[in-house]
């Protein structure tokens, strides 16, 4: 989420600095991004509490849809015959900073999605689910059945 916030600051700063975005365009962009960040933070807090549904929503919403929204424009440019060398040659300092930020953002999202499904994360969610079940003590069902 921090990478997305940093990317937003860079985008708004760049639009203000070079005059490429009107106040209305900047406001519209922020009106879309800020609620997404707030919702992601709220859902992440639910995930931290062990809610499996939150992990799925973050995976589908930010992991799939969010990543797609970040890579569509570069993929479209490449599909239209634009070459990376030309893009780098024409890029200014702000473009390079934004590109690096976007790459970091995509890498952070993909890393987070992988981490959310590692065995340790799965064990965390199982333990939370067991402790939240009626009469749950935090032990898994398998462990309780071995004790009896």
Image (cartoon, rainbow, N blue to C red):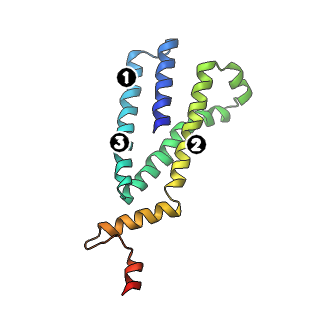
Q: CA distance from mark 1 to mark 3?
A: 18 Å
In this view of the protein, which residue sits in the foreground, 58 or 127? 127
Position above or below: 140 against 70: below
Q: CA distance from mark 3 to mark 2?
A: 20 Å
In this view of the protein, which residue sits in the foreground, 62 or 143? 143
Which numbered disc covers residue 121? none
In this rendering, position of residue 8 left or right of residue 107:
left
Query: Is the N terminus in the top left, top right, bottom left or bottom right quadrant?
Result: top left
Dots 1, 3 in contact, CB < 8 A: no
Q: Rate crowding at label 1 as few (under 14), some (14 to 19) or many (20 or more) other CA atoms within 10 Å.
A: few
User: Which residue is situated farthest in the front direction here?
Assistant: 147
Q: Nearer the viewer, mark 1 or mark 2?
A: 2
Question: What percent of the width, then of the height, locates residue 108?
Answer: 54, 43
Q: Rate crowding at label 3 as few (under 14), some (14 to 19) or many (20 or more) other CA atoms within 10 Å.
A: few
- Number of labels in the image equals 3
Query: Is the C terminus in the top left, top right, bottom left or bottom right quadrant?
Result: bottom left
N-terminal-most mark, 1 or 2: 1
Regarding residue 140, the answer to whether it shows in the image is yes
Looking at the rendered structure, the secondary structure element under dot 2 is: helix
Question: What percent of the width, then of the height, locates residue 37?
Answer: 39, 37
Question: Which residue in the structure is indicated by mark 3?
Answer: 39
Q: Rate crowding at label 2 as few (under 14), some (14 to 19) or many (20 or more) other CA atoms within 10 Å.
A: some
Looking at the rendered structure, the secondary structure element under dot 1 is: helix
Q: CA distance from mark 1 to mark 2?
A: 27 Å
Question: Which residue in the structure is indicated by mark 2?
Answer: 107
Q: Residue at x 39, y 16 (%)?
A: 23
Position above or below: 44 against 25: below
Regarding residue 83, the answer to whether it shows in the image is no
In this rendering, position of residue 44 left or right of residue 11:
left
Question: Which residue in the structure is indicated by mark 1?
Answer: 27
In this rendering, position of residue 90 left or right of residue 116:
right
């Amino acid at each position: 989420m921090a990478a997305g916030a940093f990317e937003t600051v860079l985008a708004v700063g760049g639009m203000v600095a070079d005059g490429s975005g009107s106040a209305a365009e900047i406001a519209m962009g922020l009106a879309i991004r800020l609620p997404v960040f707030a919702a992601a933070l709220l859902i992440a807090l639910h995930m931290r509490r062990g809610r499996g549904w939150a992990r799925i929503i973050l995976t589908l919403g930010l992991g799939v849809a969010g990543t797609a929204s970040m890579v569509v424009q570069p993929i479209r440019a490449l599909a239209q015959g634009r070459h990376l060398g030309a893009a780098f040659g024409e890029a200014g300092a702000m473009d390079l900073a934004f590109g690096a930020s976007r790459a970091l953002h995509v890498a952070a999202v993909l890393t987070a999605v992988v981490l959310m499904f590692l065995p340790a994360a799965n064990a965390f969610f199982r333990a939370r689910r067991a402790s939240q079940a009626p009469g749950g003590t935090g032990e898994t069902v398998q462990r309780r059945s071995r004790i009896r």
